């Protein structure tokens, strides 16, 4: 193990909670019923550290592709102790993503369910880089976002403070640990703040309900697609859940209302980005029902706007790699999201600067197109994209409204583009494992 003076914030915090909560549950496997205590998880981490000792990993990138569970968390702890830079990948990610990570980041090791494989990478990262988030690349080339441990811990601290949950709660994990959302809401709250995690086995409504009841889970960070499945089941008890958080994709007021009617629980909308961690949160869950904003600014975060209306985020959780920092340790970044603010401080997402396209000489905001379609009754989810070949705009939606009605509505709102608009109703709009709309799969479905 490294000397105390070399240990970083997450590692020091973990050791403190190991002493405090030694025999208490840290990880609960909802399917198998196995419980790993804080001391047990520490022992697993030491075993992983021994397995890694023969490799030169300090300041080197290592891909971690394992299923959610104690082994993932132990490997993560061990990698940080030996000074490695962790590159988490979803367990379901194809081998091509391992290859992408190797080419882009110069990884020296791959850790998967098949074992440990050494690689010829030689890149050395800055000494404070602890983890690299590799964006999915669903709409473009994958992008690496490096973070220091202090930044990851700051995000978790902001989340716990704003959302008001702590080590007395139990976090229900359906999100892949490699997901940026899960790192902030599941992984770091456990490793740096002692919040136990329950490993859910499947995103089926009745399975979730049974596992929540059996394990005593109290907090559910999830995505709208899972909430939609629960809302369709009819009355369902999710006790003892007390807090449901929705992120990674837009939460519609209609879904928030139906989920509340089904379970009696309100949904708290959460908005963030891979570069910044958490940004805004719907504290009383009323903004989600109204649909007027994604919530108000999170604790530890400052928001502003650029001259062209894009969101500027400042906090200690922002990736400071290649950026200057304030004396307090905060860094700033301007995102592509165009925003405004309500009189009460609610953050309103107006679309993305990178989603404005030029079709047949007409400038079109794809987010505006989606908003117009989403206002129609019985429309649940909407997704639009532009296909340069043939200069066409495609829109897919879930809901009971006929295609002709949606097409007529859009033609009235965008008359100059009526001949370029192609509308299709889908039973389910395809999404990635991270809950976001899968533009590649949507293109394949609509452009055949």
Image: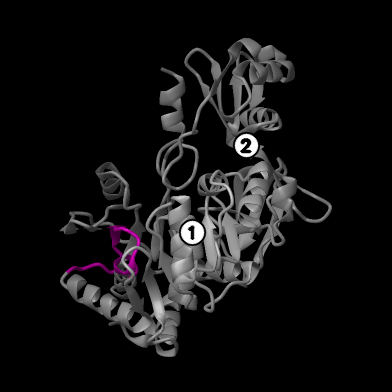
Q: Which disc number belongs to residue 426?
A: none
Secondary element under disc 1, as helix, strand or loop, is helix
Asked if residue 61 lies in the magenta stretch, the reply is: yes
Q: Label 2: few (<14), some or many (≥20) within 10 Å?
A: some
Of 34 and 336, the residue lying toward us: 34
Residue 173 placement, left or right of 287:
left
Image x and y of residue 395, in percent: 56, 24
- Spatial separation of the CA atoms under disc 1 and disc 2: 40 Å
Of 116 and 394, the residue lying toward us: 394
Image x and y of residue 245, in percent: 58, 58
1 or 2: mark nearer the eye: 1
The residue furthest right is: 343
Asked if residue 169 lies in the magenta stretch, the reply is: no
Image x and y of residue 80, in percent: 34, 71
Magenta stretch bounds: 55-73
Q: Which disc number belongs to residue 353?
A: 2
Residue 128 placement, left or right of 330:
left
Residue 148 visible here: no
Comes first in the chain, label 1 or label 2: 1
User: Which colour scheme appears in the figure?
Assistant: one colour
Q: Is residue 162 above or below residue 1?
A: above
Disc 1: which residue = 209
Image x and y of residue 125, in percent: 35, 61
């Amino acid at each position: 193990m490294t000397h105390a003076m070399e240990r970083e914030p997450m590692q020091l915090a973990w050791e403190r909670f190991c002493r405090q909560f030694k025999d208490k549950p840290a990880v609960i496997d909802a399917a198998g019923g196995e419980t790993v205590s804080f001391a047990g998880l520490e022992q697993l981490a030491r075993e992983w550290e021994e397995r890694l000792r023969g490799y030169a990993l300090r300041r080197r990138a290592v891909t971690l592709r394992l299923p959610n569970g104690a082994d993932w968390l132990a490997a993560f702890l061990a990698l940080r102790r030996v000074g490695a830079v962790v590159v988490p990948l979803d367990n379901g990610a194809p081998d091509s993503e391992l290859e992408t990570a190797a080419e882009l980041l110069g990884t020296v090791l791959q850790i998967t369910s098949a074992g440990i494989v050494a690689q010829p990478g030689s890149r050395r990262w800055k000494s404070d880089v602890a983890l690299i988030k590799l964006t999915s690349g669903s709409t473009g080339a994958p992008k690496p976002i490096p973070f220091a441990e202090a930044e990851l811990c700051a995000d978790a601290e902001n989340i716990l403070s704003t959302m008001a949950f702590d080590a007395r709660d139990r976090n229900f994990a359906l999100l892949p640990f490699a997901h940026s959302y899960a790192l902030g809401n599941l992984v770091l709250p456990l490793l740096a703040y002692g919040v136990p995690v329950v490993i859910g086995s499947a995103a089926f409504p009745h399975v979730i309900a049974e596992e929540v009841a059996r394990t005593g889970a109290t907090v559910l960070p999830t995505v709208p697609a899972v909430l939609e499945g629960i809302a369709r089941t009819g009355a369902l008890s999710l006790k003892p859940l007390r807090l449901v958080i929705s992120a990674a994709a837009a939460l519609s007021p209609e879904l928030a209302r139906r989920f509340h009617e089904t379970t009696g629980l309100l949904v708290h909308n959460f908005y963030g980005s891979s570069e910044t961690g958490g940004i805004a949160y719907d504290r009383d869950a009323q903004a989600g029902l109204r649909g007027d904003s994604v919530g108000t600014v999170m604790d530890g975060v400052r928001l502003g706007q650029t001259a062209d209306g894009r969101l500027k985020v400042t906090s200690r959780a922002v990736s400071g790699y290649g950026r200057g920092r304030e004396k307090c340790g905060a860094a700033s970044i301007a995102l592509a999201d165009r925003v405004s603010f309500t009189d009460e401080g609610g953050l309103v997402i107006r679309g993305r600067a990178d989603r404005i396209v030029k079709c047949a000489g007409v400038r079109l905001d794809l987010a505006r197109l989606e908003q117009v379609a989403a206002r129609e009754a019985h429309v649940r989810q909407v997704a639009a994209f532009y296909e340069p070949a043939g200069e066409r705009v495609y829109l897919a939606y879930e809901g009971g409204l006929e295609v002709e009605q949606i097409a007529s509505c859009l033609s009235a709102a965008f008359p100059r583009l009526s001949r370029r608009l192609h509308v299709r109703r889908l039973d389910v709009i395809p999404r990635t494992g991270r809950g976001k709309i899968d533009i590649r799969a949507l293109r394949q479905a609509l452009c055949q």
